[in-house]
Structures are given as C-alpha cells and as structure tokens.
Amino acid sequence: MATKLPCRRNAIWNPNKGPEFLRKNYLATEDTAQEIFDVLNKNIWNSELERTNIEIGRIRGSYGWCLGLNTPAGEFYTKKIKLTPKWGCLQWFITILAHEMVHHWQCSIYSNERYESGMPWSKSFIMSHGPSFHRWKASLAKYDIPLKLQH
Ligand SMILES: [Zn+2]
C-alpha cells in the first residue's frame, strides 16, 4: 500500500506555525536523481529515454519542471529537468521526477514520432497533461507511484 504523499491536506498541523510540510527530510542530489532516473527508465520506459541533464536547484512555485527544445535540424529534445533540493520524503521526490520524466518522453520521443507520422512540425511538439501524459499512469501505478498533475 502506498504511503500518502505530504500535501496540504495531510500535513501535520503545528498550532503555532500552521501546516508543516516536513520539506527537509530528504535532500536531493544530482547523482541520486540520475540513479533514480535510470531505475525508472529501465522499469517504466524499457530504457528508451536518453539521459538528460538533471539540475537540483531552488524553484519558485513548483517542485520541478522539464524544458523541451529543438535542435537546429528540427528534432525535439529535452534540454533539462530541474528539481527543487528539499523534499518531504524520498517517495515524493521520486513521484515528481517520474512526472517530469513523462514530460521528457513526450518531448524527446512522442513529439518526434508525431512529426515522423506526418503531423506538421509546428504542431508536433507536445508537453502537456493530456492523454499522452496519462498513458503512463498505469505503468507507474504498478510501482505505487502516483502520476500527479501538480509539479
Ligand atoms: Zn507537468
């Protein structure tokens, strides 16, 4: 059974400070992020994703993001995944990394497949929370990793 992720709804209530998110329990590093990336890639994506730059650094207003660009030749690729350094728990970190990896797949694999199948280049790029995002929900659920919409 999955442990509930820390969030506003199940935060521990501190009568003096309000909700405590316990955000300092797990400090992420770029090395562990790459290790977890490799484990998720092997188990969820059959190692089809290319390694991408994962930066750990402060982010305002979210836990992570994924940046997709295109090469001069027009191929879509993921330039970077960025994740915040302080986490409530390791499970939470893995959940958000998995979310950004779905965007990495959308950008670096699915966008190129769309173009190769005849879609105009200007419409091929996709990084969204639509059907191609939710396609990975069941695969991640096998490992009790929820595919959450926020990041
Ligand atoms: Zn997202």
Image (cartoon, rainbow, N blue to C red):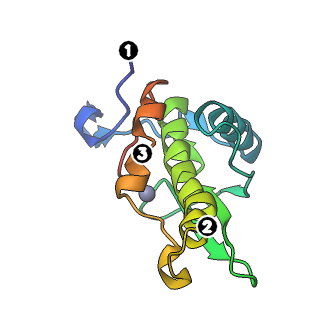
Tell me, yes or no, if residue 104 can be seen here: yes
Q: Position of residue 102 (x, y in %)?
A: 52, 50
Q: Are marks 3 and 1 in contact (CB under 8 Å)?
A: no
Residue at the limit of the structure toward the top, as seen here? 1
Residue at 52% x, 57% y: name it.
Answer: 103
Badge 2 amino acid: Asn
Report which quarter residue 72 is drawn in.
bottom right
Name the N-terminal-most of marks 1 and 2.
1
Residue at 63% x, 62% y: name it.
Answer: 108
Kindly state the secondary structure of the residue where label 1 is placed.
loop
What is the distance, in whole Å, between disc 2 and disc 3 at their CAs?
A: 17 Å
Badge 3 amino acid: Arg
Whether the residue carrying mark 3 lies under 8 Å from ligand 1 is answered with no
Q: Residue 1 shows which numbered tag? A: 1
Q: Which residue is mark 2?
A: 112
From the viewer's perspective, is residue 133 above or below residue 74?
above
- Residue in the foreground of this view, choosing between 150 and 119: 119
Report which quarter residue 113 is drawn in.
bottom right
Q: Which residue is mark 3?
A: 135
What is the distance, in whole Å, between disc 1 and disc 2 at their CAs?
A: 37 Å
Ligand 1 quadrant? bottom left
Badge 1 amino acid: Met
Q: Are marks 1 and 2 in contact (CB under 8 Å)?
A: no
- Residue in the foreground of this view, choosing between 99 and 54: 99
Q: Is residue 84 left or right of residue 52?
A: left
Q: Residue 141 shows which numbered tag? A: none
Name the N-terminal-most of marks 3 and 1.
1
Residue at 61% x, 40% y: name it.
Answer: 45
Q: Position of residue 131 (x, y in %)?
A: 36, 54
